[in-house]
Image: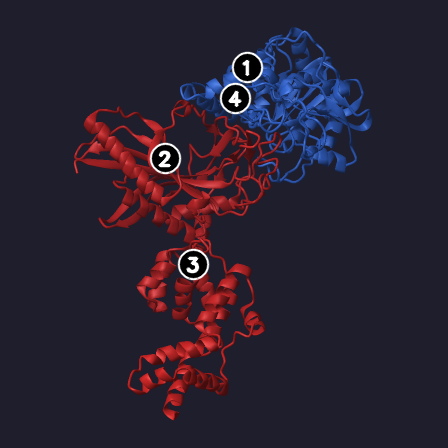
Chain colours: A red, B blue
Amino acid sequence: MKYETIIGLEVHVELATKSKLFCPCSTEFGSDINENVCPICSGMPGTSPMINKKAVELGIAAGLLTNSAIARRIAFDKKNYFYPDLPSGYQVTQLFSPICKNGWVEIETDAGKRRINLTQIHIEEDAGKLIHDDWTDTTLVDFNRASVPLIEIVTNPDFRSGEEVVAFLEKLRSLLSFAGVSDCKMQEGSMRCDINLSVREKGTEKLGTRTEIKNMNSLKAITAAIAYESRRHIEALETGDEVLVQETRRWDDSIGETFSMRGKEDATDYRFCPDPDIMPVFIGDEWIDSVRDNLPETAQAKFIRLTEELDLSEYDSEIITRSKNLSDIFDETLKHFENPKEVANWVIVELLAIAKGDNKNEDDVRIDCRKFAKLIELVENKTINRNVGKQVLSLVLEDDIDPVQYIEENKLGMISDTSLINEIIKKVLWENPKAVEEYRGGSKKVQGFFIGQIMRKLGGKANPQMITSLLRDALKED
Amino acid sequence: MGLFIENYNISGADAVALEDSIMEKGRGVTVGSRILKNFVSPFNATVVDRLLDNGFKIAGRANMDEFGLLKLSRDDDNMPTGAIRAVSDDVAAFSLCNDLFGRYRREATENDCCYIHPTYGTVSRYGLVPLASSMDQIGIVCKDLAQGFGLLSYISGKDPKDGAMFPESTYDYTKPAGEITLGVPKSVIEKADVDTQDAITEFIDGFANTEIDLEHFDLYSRVMYILSSAEISNNLSRYDGIKFGYRASNFSDLEDLYTKTRSEGFGPDAKSAIIMGAMMLSKDQYGAYYERAMKVRRLIKESIKFDRYNVIVLPCNIGDDPYENLSLYALSPLAGLPSVSFSYKGHGIQLIAGVKNEDLLLSTWEVCKA
């Protein structure tokens, strides 16, 4: 390869605060349009922003997790531009004194371990959302997201491949979501990034013309966009057919290409200035220490705990610790049923299978862990069999039913009445004389066939081991 | 200019007129501008709540210059602003307004009224339509400063809805102030007419006093103009025709909606401030104007030491040019200092004290009245 691609990122992460950056409005995703709006976050005159301390705290946490230097005094600035989704005509951000500087994150790819350096992390407010109504051909504004707190993580141009970018974003997601800084859901827009990319000949110093791809919100699209864009740059350098210009581009996922967003964007002068309505916030050692002391377990620490203390396989531990949500479910369920292997098994195999069937991923599964634990226990103590357990699990997930009550009401408990089972066995053997002969002739394979038949007649509600032993006795007797 | 934009026909000793920039729930707030035509406030300003809680009544919404902006051209209409007239005409006992550029402070002294400009951060600005946030300050027009400070004690004190306030929940303005030593900036007073100079000489005779030099005085109005324009251009950005207020009736696209709404909605003084402010904040000019003005603002603040003196005496008028007069009124907003203006022997006098030292101002006034 003659060329190398140089990439830097600006990652926007929505902070997991309950309320917005400057007002008490809820930050909940999926609320009704303009449900979470008040005079402050809709930019009405006469209101004053009140800084959300929790947002600053999460900013400190992000700094600690990324080995950043945390500022002792932070202030906020106004970034001025007109757009209907921006209620005040300016966005509150941090230009002059960001909360974190000079951090780094270690990533691991096939090429080995590398450090990605962070220029800075700053806190800012999100904008609202425009919704076009095709029916009336009008554009409407939803301010639910306006003033939701974000951090923007700006990296140095340290990446050399899309693979590294993905590894970085996954690492960031793991760090931030386990610490409760953000849920980092790319599909809901709570984590998104802008990619700055240029290409130069290997061994040269000077950076090539840089383009920026805005608002990327899936790892797949990021990988594809980086591949496409570096190819476009290389072709332009080689053939000279296209002159590269410094510009902002948009990735079209359905076509698989980037397109120039020509417009006034690049010419905008944001007229930054300090925001006199927000007093500077001072961050003392005690505050930083208390945030550090209260940081939850990282995914890495949890992995070590699962493999070493709970003796789970690396494979299982890896799956559980890939998602904050899944690992929370694991921990919580384990509290109520203390068998790590079984709980891990149910979480990884059954829970995820049902979730996948419902088109949910590991971050979206929600379950009452107490009920989940009870269900696992009922299977383990053989009150119900595993298949029934799976069926009940999907009902717990879907309708939050109470498993104990449901099993009782629907008589799903296992049949432990040996006389009833023996009766069924007799019936099955009587109906299948040929198979009985085969068995006695030495073909033990038909045992499986018998068990299947018996199980079906029992409605799947018997312990297979019990059936096997009773079946063997019955075949001897005859 | 008519006295009221909206007259509630209430008068008396407990009647307070509000400049049309102070919001009342369910009432229109125009700020004297077409851009907020038909805007109805969804909430009460904190000062309004505090007035009502303490038995005061609102007399009406007083007329004002657009947003309370600095008028660079003299109006043909020489009538005082509504908030002043409400008190001088005995319609209301008090008026509340936001006097950034000094018009109220000057007109009060010319109309037999007094003006109290409290310490920045002691009166909540929640519900005050912002002009220049780092300097906005609700003040009181009254007939008698003792009564005015009485009213101030009801409306001042920390409000959790205003992020830039001192922590005290109440202030006592009547506590006996210590020794008063007036600081007399002779070079500034000499700019006033001879009669005013004589009145001031007579005034300071009743006190211990010392001559002082107001360093950077020639920069006051320029710093004030630059910083206020920048902040005004920010604060007026929210009036874009999208969410509330005036919207042009015919437009072809978003850009056209913005342009027409703001062209039709704002008057000449607002446009001038918006354009100047935007220029001063632009990438190329930021260092030359805004950043430098911020530095000078700090120098000005640091230059007012209140060491050998604790109350500064200034005239209220040094000429017909509002821009020149602005220098007299810029110090309080720029440094967040409290001041009072009143008429002494028919001439306007302004007293400025240190942060939260309103008691000194009241004592000085009481001495001179006695």
Q: CA distance from mark 3 to mark 1?
A: 58 Å
Q: Nearer the viewer, mark 3 or mark 4?
A: 4
Say which residue appears at 80% left-offset and 21% top-offset: B91
Q: CA distance from mark 3 to mark 2?
A: 31 Å
Say which residue appears at 54% left-offset and 27% top-offset: B305
Q: Amino acid at mark 1?
A: Ser
Q: What residue is pinned by disc 3?
A: A326
Chain hosting mark 1: B
Residue B166 image position (x, y, % from top left): 59, 37
Chain hosting mark 3: A
Q: What residue is pinned by disc 1?
A: B272
Q: Nearer the viewer, mark 1 or mark 4?
A: 4
Looking at marks 1 and 4 on the same chain, the residue that comes earlier in the sequence is marked by 4
Q: Quadrant of residue A410?
A: bottom right
Residue at the bottom extreme, as displayed = A477
Q: Amino acid at mark 4?
A: Asp
Q: Nearer the viewer, residue A456 or A135?
A: A456
- Density class for disc 2 (Cα within 10 Å; few <14, some 14-19, many ≥20) is many
- Density class for disc 3 (Cα within 10 Å; few <14, some 14-19, many ≥20) is many
Image disc number at residue A251: 2
Chain hosting mark 4: B
Q: Nearer the viewer, mark 3 or mark 2?
A: 2
- Density class for disc 1 (Cα within 10 Å; few <14, some 14-19, many ≥20) is some
Say which residue appears at 37% left-offset and 38% top-offset: A254
Quadrant of image for the C terminus of chain A: bottom left
- Density class for disc 4 (Cα within 10 Å; few <14, some 14-19, many ≥20) is few
Q: What residue is pinned by disc 4?
A: B253
Q: Amino acid at mark 2?
A: Trp
Do pointers 4 and 2 mark residues of a single chain?
Answer: no
